[in-house]
Amino acid sequence: MRRYPLKRTWFIFRKLFLRTYHPTFTATNITDIRSSVMIFGVMTAFTSTISLLFVDSLVRTKEASFWIAFFRISSLLICFFVYLFAKKRIRLFERHIFSITSLILASLILLYIPMMVYDKPNHSYYLFGSAIVVASASIILWIEPIRIFLLSGLYVFIFIPLHLNFSQILGFDRFIFYQDILIVIFLLGFGLVANLLINYWRFEEFRAKIRLRITVGKLLRINQKIEDLSRVDSMTELFNRRHLLEQFELYKKRSHREGFVIGLVILDLDRLKIINDKYGHKQGDMAIQAFSRTLRSRTRSTDIAARIGGDEFCLLVSPIDKVGLINLTENIREKLESLKIPIHNHPGETLGLTVSIGATLFRSSDDPSFDELYHKIDTALYTSKNEGRNRVTILEEE
């Protein structure tokens, strides 16, 4: 029971302080991150310019004034290059933007050390100035809490001992020292808490968008699957009548544009009712499925094979000519005629199948409707049936 609170505490600590940004998160928000870096660079450059123009009057030597001005100009140049790298979208800078920004931020903070050394009477100014840099970076920059925590630790272990040392040397009241430290700790704490809250909501918003994107993707796939199922016959996995009619209109438009001939074929299994009555509907379903596999194996990927009734099928083929249509339909008929399917309740016995076929060719310029063409080909199909079944009848183009 004691281990659970510890695990929970470690989990919360890890999520709050040690979580780094996912590369996808960085790539998604890189524009906003660059804008924040540019804003921070301008703000820091502005404060460096102000402090450069007003070199402290308590500095007594020219050498001290020179070095203070030198380090302030250095910080100004760093801010300029940061702004430039972000503005110009330097690839290396964007790829390692958090590491480089953290390094630059640490450099800006460390530049305050020599200024404190050369300007001891005003060391409190540099103490607060560097603390404000850390706090503003925590709020403005998109830096992970662990980096801000480390930078704050770096600040505390360097600047507070220096501040204490210079306060003792200059004989400042200890009460003032503690007051300064309290203000600095407040600034750092405020920045760290703000960083935690801002980054928490940033990341949660990103995760919400990712979850929404995944959910939308799943819904789209489900809708696509439903759409596909609505166009496919579940037993044969061939297209259904609805899809056939849609493709018929598209084929006509394409034929009109490219000038090719379209073939429409109706295929009807022979004596399926007898098979159902003699062996049961399961055997009839097996016969339909065997014929569907044969039909798929003999058609091109650009052709549309559909089941439009119980034992009635349709082919929409293009481009094709009369010789090609005859070869296609005869190939299907011969393949099915040679096919033997097992009888499910009679082990070792097989059953033969045949198909009667009616077909025709047409051009888009004729502009026939599907029903008109279907009824026209139906006469050819009945011709095949009446002449003994297992044959192909091709209607001539008018």
Image (spheres, rainbow, N blue to C red):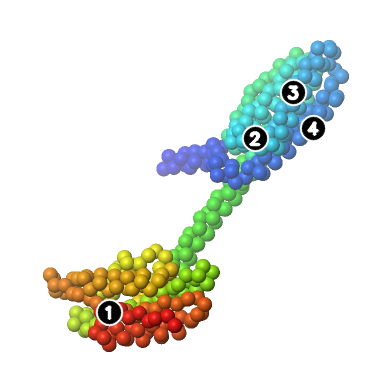
Measure how far apart labels 4 and 2 are at the Cα level.
23 Å
Residue identifier under label 2 = 90
Measure how far apart labels 3 and 1 are at the Cα level.
94 Å
Which of the marked residues, 3 or 2, is nearer the chain's N terminus? 3
Which of the marked residues, 2 or 1, is nearer the chain's N terminus? 2
Which of the marked residues, 4 or 1, is nearer the chain's N terminus? 4
Q: Nearer the viewer's eye, disc 4 or disc 1?
A: 1
Q: Is residue 315 visible?
A: no
Is residue 132 depicted above or below 115 in this figure?
below
Mark 1 Cα shell of 10 Å, populated few (<14), some (14-19), many (≥20): some
Q: Nearer the viewer's eye, disc 3 or disc 1?
A: 1
Q: Nearer the viewer's eye, disc 3 or disc 2?
A: 2
Residue 83 percent across, percent down from the top left: 72, 34
Q: Is residue 34 visible?
A: yes
Residue 216 percent across, percent down from the top left: 52, 59
Residue identifier under label 3 = 74
Residue 74: image quadrant is: top right
**Label disc, if present, on residue 46 of the rendered structure:** 4
Type of amino acid at the residue the image marks with label 4: Phe
Type of amino acid at the residue the image marks with label 3: Ser
Q: Is label 1 in a helix, a strand or a loop?
A: loop
Measure how far apart labels 2 and 1 are at the Cα level.
73 Å
Type of amino acid at the residue the image marks with label 1: Arg
Measure how far apart labels 3 and 2 are at the Cα level.
21 Å
